[in-house]
Image (cartoon, rainbow, N blue to C red):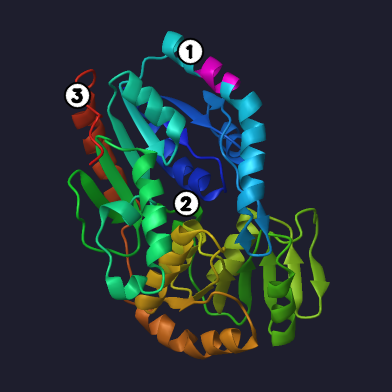
């Protein structure tokens, strides 16, 4: 089967999760990948037929999205990016005729599928915002953000053949052609053995978020920090803070032995912490409601704590709740990636039968 697989390039979470699915698909199918940003380099090292496209980016300041700067940056990028995407589009039309499109929240592959009446299967965690029912009590105080984000998510890949949503929380599904499946986990995470420890694993990629670093320093607790000092080639200690260069093996080892995790509201790290049963203090990026929703469900399930900002009181409260979170996490389990991959294989067979006839006009 010929498959066009699109991966959104903003952030690395989509790329690391898509890697797992692509490793499965490329064993049996002819797969071409379209991807933008840093995710392109990550996937190009692991797979053939990786096509670079231009995609939207987000600008940050502190722990919030810089909306106006984001708009300007993307307008500037589009001037050179769209002509390149058009060329990639026609190259794919001429040289590769996919039977099915899979989109990880990526628009280029979706539009290709729609224009050629090729069924599109959506595989990501974002569609849970639109295709499930969420308790109003959970969303209290966030209603405006929720409705705005829901409308954006709904418009991303409307009318797809099926929506396969990865998640560690399970609200009621409200739309047809929707399946919830356990989180996509890297094989390195599946192989990791969770052990007790005393340090905090901190993941922070926004170098402008100095307030977080100041609060961690005040805590006096051992904190192993990844992402904040991007140019490091060796460990750098500043009192109780240990800044570490990126190392997949080192990061996973620090995660599996951590007392708890401090990070944003990104789905990848959160899902890995839940799987390894590590309590998490989530401080979502301002202006990204998807991260807020992840954190709200994390807190509702008792797996961690949601906070709008980090200070000594918030960190202290989280550490006091760690034993309760550990108890709640004992009830979580999943059979690796088996359910998701089996479901996807079945959907591919069904979708291939509909190639050329699938009407994707509907927005349902």
Q: Is residue 84 magenta?
A: yes
Nearer-the-camera pick, 81 or 46: 81
Q: Is residue 358 left or right of residue 91?
A: left
Visible residue check, residue 308:
yes
- Image quadrant for the C terminus? top left
Q: Secondary structure at mark 1?
A: helix
Which residue bears the numbered disc 2? 186
Q: Residue 329, position in %: x, y? A: 38, 76
Q: Is residue 343 magenta?
A: no
Compute the Cα span from label 1 to label 3.
Answer: 23 Å
- Taking the image as shown, residue 253 lies to the left or right of residue 216, namely left
Q: Nearer the viewer, residue 198 or 286?
A: 286
Crowd class of label 2 (few under 14; some 14 to 19; many from 20; radius 10 Å): some
Q: Label 1 belongs to which residue?
A: 90
| Residue lying furthest top | 94
Q: Earlier in the sequence, mark 1 or mark 3?
A: 1
Q: Residue 81 sits in which quadrant?
A: top right
Q: Is residue 101 above or below residue 329?
A: above
CA gap, disc 3 to disc 2? 31 Å
Mark 2 or mark 1: whose residue is earlier in sequence: 1
Percent x, y for residue 257? 56, 73
Q: Nearer the viewer, residue 239 or 354?
A: 354
Contact? badges 2 and 1 (CB < 8 Å)? no
**Which stretch did the figure color magenta?**
83-88
Q: Is residue 329 visible?
A: no
Q: Is residue 182 left or right of residue 34?
A: left
């Amino acid at each position: 089967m010929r498959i066009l697989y699109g991966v959104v390039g903003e952030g690395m979470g989509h790329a690391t999760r898509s890697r797992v699915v692509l490793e499965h698909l490329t064993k049996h199918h002819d797969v071409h990948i379209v991807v933008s940003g840093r995710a392109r380099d990550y996937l190009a090292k692991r797979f053939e037929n990786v096509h670079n496209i231009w995609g939207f980016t987000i600008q940050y300041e502190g722990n919030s999205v810089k909306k106006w700067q984001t708009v300007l940056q993307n307008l500037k990028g589009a001037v050179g990016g769209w002509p390149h995407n058009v060329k990639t589009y026609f190259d794919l039309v001429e040289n590769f005729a996919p039977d099915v499109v899979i989109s990880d929240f990526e628009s280029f592959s979706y539009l290709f599928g729609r224009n050629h009446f090729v069924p599109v299967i959506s595989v990501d965690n974002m569609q849970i915002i639109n295709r499930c029912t969420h308790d109003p009590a959970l969303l209290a105080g966030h209603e405006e953000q929720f409705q705005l984000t829901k409308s954006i998510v709904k418009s991303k890949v409307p009318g797809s053949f099926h929506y396969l949503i990865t998640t560690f929380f399970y609200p009621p599904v409200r739309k047809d052609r929707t399946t919830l499946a356990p989180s996509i986990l890297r094989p390195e995470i599946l192989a990791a053995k969770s052990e007790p420890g005393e340090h905090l694993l901190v993941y922070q990629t926004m170098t402008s978020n100095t307030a977080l670093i100041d609060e961690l320093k005040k805590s006096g607790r051992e904190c192993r920090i990844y992402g904040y000092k991007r140019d490091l080639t060796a460990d750098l200690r500043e009192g109780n803070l240990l800044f570490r260069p990126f190392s997949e093996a080192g990061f996973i080892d620090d995660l599996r032995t951590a007392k708890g995790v401090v990070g944003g509201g990104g789905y990848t790290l959160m899902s890995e912490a839940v799987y390894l049963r590590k309590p998490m203090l989530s401080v979502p990026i301002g202006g990204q409601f998807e991260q807020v929703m992840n954190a709200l469900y994390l807190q509702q399930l008792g797996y961690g704590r949601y906070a709008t900002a980090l200070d000594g009181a918030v960190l202290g409260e989280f550490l006091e709740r760690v034993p309760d979170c550990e108890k709640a996490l004992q009830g979580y389990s999943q059979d690796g990636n088996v359910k998701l991959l089996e479901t996807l294989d079945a959907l591919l067979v069904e979708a291939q039968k509909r190639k050329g006839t699938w009407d994707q006009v509907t927005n349902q």
